[in-house]
Amino acid sequence: MNNPSNLGLPIGTTLDRFIKKKQDEFEYATGELSQLLRDIGLAGKIINREVNKSGLLDIGGAYGSKNVQGEDQQKLDVIANIRFTRALHNGGQVCAIVSEEDEEVIKLNTNGKYVVCMDPLDGSSNIDVNVSIGTIFSVYRRLSPLGAEVTQEDLLQPGTEQVAAGYILYGSSTMLVYTTGHGVNGFTLEPSLGEFVLSHANMTYPTDGKIYSINEGSWNEFDQELRDYITWCKDNNLTARYIGSLVADFHRNMLKGGIYIYPSTTKVPEGKLRLLYECNSLAFIAEQAGGVATDGQQRVLEIQPKAFHQRSPLYIGSKNMVKKASEFVAKESKEMS
Ligand code: AHM
Ligand code: MG
């Protein structure tokens, strides 16, 4: 990246200091987005604490209820949703949240400038087996006037309008990775300090890679074009890696070079992943890091959402790899910049 997004701040800089320094770069910044990002960092630390206790306390396992997609909610899903909502409510910068765990919009401060879309705990089938899981978020500036009722237009903005997006990966270490549209930076939680510190400055997606990540168990539900692409991957000695936690698969591929695919299948024609709080957030990060994200046909960030929990297929990763996959699956092959 020509314009270093970490402002020359050294590895080890705390997240709070980093956010403050970035804010100072913008003459008219009022500090509200900075406060919001700090609130997300705090919520991430709280959820990390809960995730780390899973297995010790009686917080693993199904909650006994279903979320809006009819999926079993895990106790930690519910806990993460509450923690995030509370942190954003207390912060006061957010007027509404669209969450994977809530069918309805969560309305917060009518004077808040921002809308947040989030999946508080993604990869929830991995919670009980001690495998990496993650939080995903997107931030939009509201379009309606402050103090007014939040509108559909505020909530259903295309991904190109994101002002910030990020994820928290609860893995072998806990990391927060985010962008405000000026490159991507990653912060690792230093457990003894309880602080996220800059560990991965100016993250960039390798242009090419060797990893393909897809649930091949669904082979019988793939269309022929996708099968041909996967066969091409095998013929070209690519390596298959699939955790089944989007954040973890995405993060690994961004560091090493790779492509993650959740396609349209006969069982889920729209794909499984949600546009507003899974695909768009990671697409923004991918593009900021030099990667590409499509739904197989078009740029994810340009899809106009029509519903809060809308799904989309996702092809995301290294530029040349997504381009190659598109040569197989795109109905109309378009040149990707
Ligand atoms: P979730 O939001 O219910 O956790 O579902 C999303 C997860 C992704 O993290 C993961 O990539 C995908 O579902 C795995 O799905 P599958 O088991 O169909 O491969
Ligand atoms: Mg999810």
Image: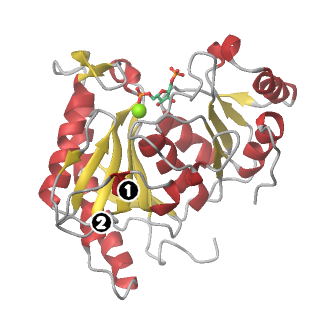
Q: Nearer the viewer, residue 105 or 230?
A: 105
Q: Badge 1: few (under 14), some or many (20 or more) residues near its Cα, within 10 Å?
A: few
**Residue 12 in the image: x percent, y percent?**
38, 65
Residue at the extreme bottom:
27
Vertical arrangement, residue 7 with respect to residue 302, above or below: below
**Residue 183 in the image: x percent, y percent?**
53, 66
User: The disc labelled 2 sits on which kind of residue?
Assistant: Ser
Q: Nearer the viewer, residue 133 or 280?
A: 280
Give me the residue at 21% from left, 69% from top: 146
Give me the residue at 80% from left, 20% from top: 224
Q: Can residue 177 be seen in this view?
A: no
Secondary element at image label 2: loop
Q: Mark 2 points at which residue?
A: 144
Q: Mark 1 points at which residue?
A: 153
Q: Nearer the viewer, residue 13 or 328?
A: 328
Vertical arrangement, residue 210 with respect to residue 320, above or below: above
Is disc 1 in contact with disc 2, using a CB cutoff of under 8 Å? yes
Residue at the extreme top:
220
Secondary element at image label 1: helix
